[in-house]
Image (cartoon, rainbow, N blue to C red):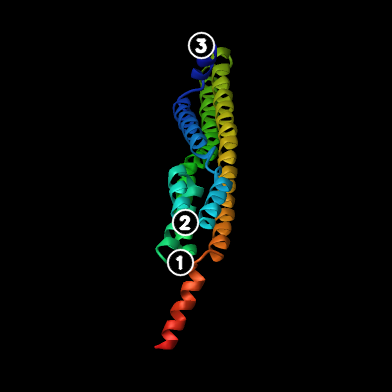
Amino acid sequence: MLEILNTLAQGGPVMVPLAVCSLLAATVIIERYLALRKADRGGEELIATIRRAYRSGDGAEGLSRCEQIGGPVANVLAAGLRAHLLEVPTAEAMEERALADQRMLNRRLVVLDTIVTLAPLLGLLGTVLGMIRAFGIISVSGTSHPAGITGGVAEALIATATGLGIAIITLIGYNWCRDKVRQVTEEIELRATQLENLLAGAPGTDQEKQAEREEASVAH
């Protein structure tokens, strides 16, 4: 381990921002993994619970279960059920809640995206600085100091390899997060559609209430 650290320390001044990038990437990847790994679960159970609740005539039971479980899917379903119980359009309520949760799902992913681009550029900068150092030694003392020349080349190669390594690992984590967000989004859309279809057949649905309001306006 100490040998690896000593080798990395020879990469020159760009190793400091590269170290910061690696720490940021690791922190964000771990935080996003913990936040997203179970974000798409529970939808099937919630729909089954809501269906049983409406069959027994107690829609509030399904809402209570959604609030108890939490998470993006449960939050959207809870918004729809709450709107239905308050006799307001459910689709708009669920869409608004889904947009709010979408921001949460994509939180800090821009950091990973930036590091994927920035780390190789920092590595390239280290390469340029190392080669400048090597050629500076050659211009002053010729080839009489091979250790200084090879040190500059080593600095260039270490910085390049470190930047590429950080970018590769970060890219893997970033792609996993993006794919997980896509899965959660699809799960939200599926369960929201199922809830709309379920409420369309439940007593006192939005369509029935709208029809009643139209009949009342015609009667007046």
Q: SS of the residue at dot 1?
A: loop
Q: Residue at x 47, y 34 (%)?
A: 31
Q: Image quadrant for the C terminus? A: bottom left
Residue under label 2, please give it.
Answer: 59
Q: SS of the residue at dot 3?
A: helix
Looking at the image, is mark 3 or mark 2 nearer the viewer?
2
Looking at the image, is mark 2 or mark 1 nearer the viewer?
2
| Label 2 environment density (alpha carbons within 10 Å; few <14, some 14–19, many ≥20) | many
- Number of numbered tags placed on the structure image: 3
Q: At label 3, which amino acid type do we have? A: Leu
Alpha carbon distance from label 3 to label 2:
62 Å
Residue under label 3, please give it.
Answer: 2
Q: Earlier in the sequence, mark 1 or mark 3?
A: 3
Alpha carbon distance from label 2 to label 1:
16 Å
Q: Residue at x 49, y 63 (%)?
A: 91
Relative image position of residue 80 (x, y in whole percent):
47, 58
Residue most extreme to the front: 56
Relative image position of residue 5 (x, y in whole percent):
50, 16
Question: Is residue 116 shown to the viewer in this render?
Answer: yes
Q: At label 1, which amino acid type do we have? A: Pro
Residue 89 is marked as 1
Q: At label 2, which amino acid type do we have? A: Gly
Q: Earlier in the sequence, mark 3 or mark 2?
A: 3
